[in-house]
Amino acid sequence: MRTRILFVALSVVLLGLVGWAAFKDSTSRTYITIQEQYQKDYPSSDFNVQVQQLFPSFPQATIEGDTYRVERCISCHVPDIATIGPVEAAERLSQDFFKYEPDAKQLAAEYHLTGIHPAYVTATGGNYPPSMSYAAYGPDGFTSFTYTPYTPPGAAPAKPVTVEQAGPLPSFLDPDTDYGSASGPATGELGIDQIGCIVCHNGNRLSVDEADAHQNLIINPEYSFTEGAQLYYQNCARCHGGLGEGGAGPPLNNQDRLGYYNEDYYYRCIMYGFTGFEHYGSIMPNWGGIASDYNEQANPPGPGAVVNTSPVLSQAQINILIQFIRQWEDYSTLP
């Protein structure tokens, strides 16, 4: 009898816990509040805020057999994309960021946000509505940079090299391309479905759950690309190559190799260089500081390494540089 009573009591407790978990799961998610606010701002929408539109596929972004997905981004960002279409959804992204993000003004000031979201790409770009220029940031939108390659100790000084860095938008995002079926018209203005959040977030390789996406997102590819490229050629190209092909340092233009690492790994690498435990004995400079547990006698830097006694790059600059490296994706799968 006692066993039966104990079993019933435990069953009731278990059911109660399951019910409480279900309640919390359906009410304690920030995206629901955002969706409700979205519905107030766009009352014509018939979107049910309790239903997420998950995994809309976009065959335009299929590369080497892998299809990128919008994933859960649209739970908060324009949740009625299925109703209004990918182009209108892309137009709303920038303006809704300033509506729903509590720290929007702070982020805009910190990262110099332009208010132009790359999910909306047109031939020449514009501000009304905000769109990114394919002419300026497509693969043929070259910007020239000059750097001096690394000179090993005792070798003759290297001569400066000028390279042309292609824009961050891959060729499959050309607004003039006829996407989808052969009988359909060209899409012209592209939207979220064609571009997909993952093209710009996480370097196309990292995890896409909410935590990883937000920790590794690229805030504003247009700004960070131009700023990041300048930082790269000023500080990194001499060892990693003008096109990221590598040299004195490892290659950086192959995300199939480096995409397995998250932003924290990149940050530690740039911040601490050879003073960080992952790069002991290398010539990677410590651009931001010296690791607190570094012992120079036990782990001296490699020959010719630059030892920075004070920070050369700020935390914001290091993060922008990481974003630039993440965008440096050749969109091919290598062995």
Image: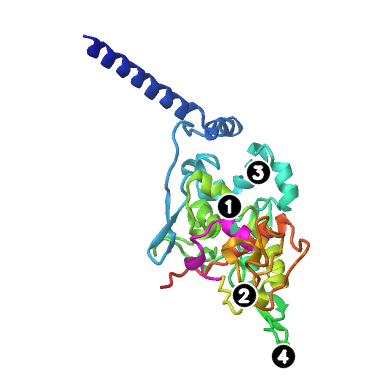
Q: Nearer the viewer, mark 2 or mark 1?
A: 2
Image coordinates for residue 295, horizontal then vertical, percent: 66, 62
Image coordinates for residue 150, horizontal then vertical, percent: 68, 80
Image coordinates for residue 213, horizontal then vertical, percent: 53, 49
Q: Please tell me whether residue 121 is drawn above or below residue 11 in the rendered image.
A: below
Q: Amino acid at mark 3?
A: Gln
Question: In which quadrant of the rendered view does residue 319 lie?
Answer: bottom right
Residue range corresponding to the magenta coloring? 253-271
Name the residue located 72 percent from the left edge and 68 percent from the top edge: 230
Label number found at residue 156: 4
Q: Please tell me whether residue 21 is drawn above or below residue 173 in the rendered image.
A: above
Residue topped by disc 1: 217
Residue topped by disc 2: 240
Work out how far the residue at label 4 is from the one at label 1, CA to CA, in angstroms.
Answer: 41 Å
Q: Amino acid at mark 1?
A: Leu
On whether residue 290 falls in the magenta region, the answer is: no
Q: Amino acid at mark 2?
A: His
Task: Work out whether mark 1 precedes mark 3 in sequence or the reverse, and give the earlier one.
Answer: 3
Q: Amino acid at mark 4?
A: Ala
Q: Nearer the viewer, mark 1 or mark 3?
A: 1
Label number found at residue 95: 3
Q: Residue furthest front?
A: 297
Task: Work out whether mark 3 precedes mark 4 in sequence or the reverse, and give the earlier one.
Answer: 3
Image coordinates for residue 212, horizontal then vertical, percent: 52, 48
Tell whether label 2 touches label 4 (CB within 8 Å). no
On whether residue 258 falls in the magenta region, the answer is: yes
Task: Work out whether mark 4 precedes mark 1 in sequence or the reverse, and give the earlier one.
Answer: 4
Task: Work out whether mark 4 precedes mark 2 in sequence or the reverse, and give the earlier one.
Answer: 4
Majority SS type along the magenta span: helix
Work out how far the residue at label 4 is from the one at label 2, CA to CA, in angstroms.
Answer: 19 Å
* Helix, strand or loop status at disc 1: loop
* Quadrant in the picture for the N terminus: top left
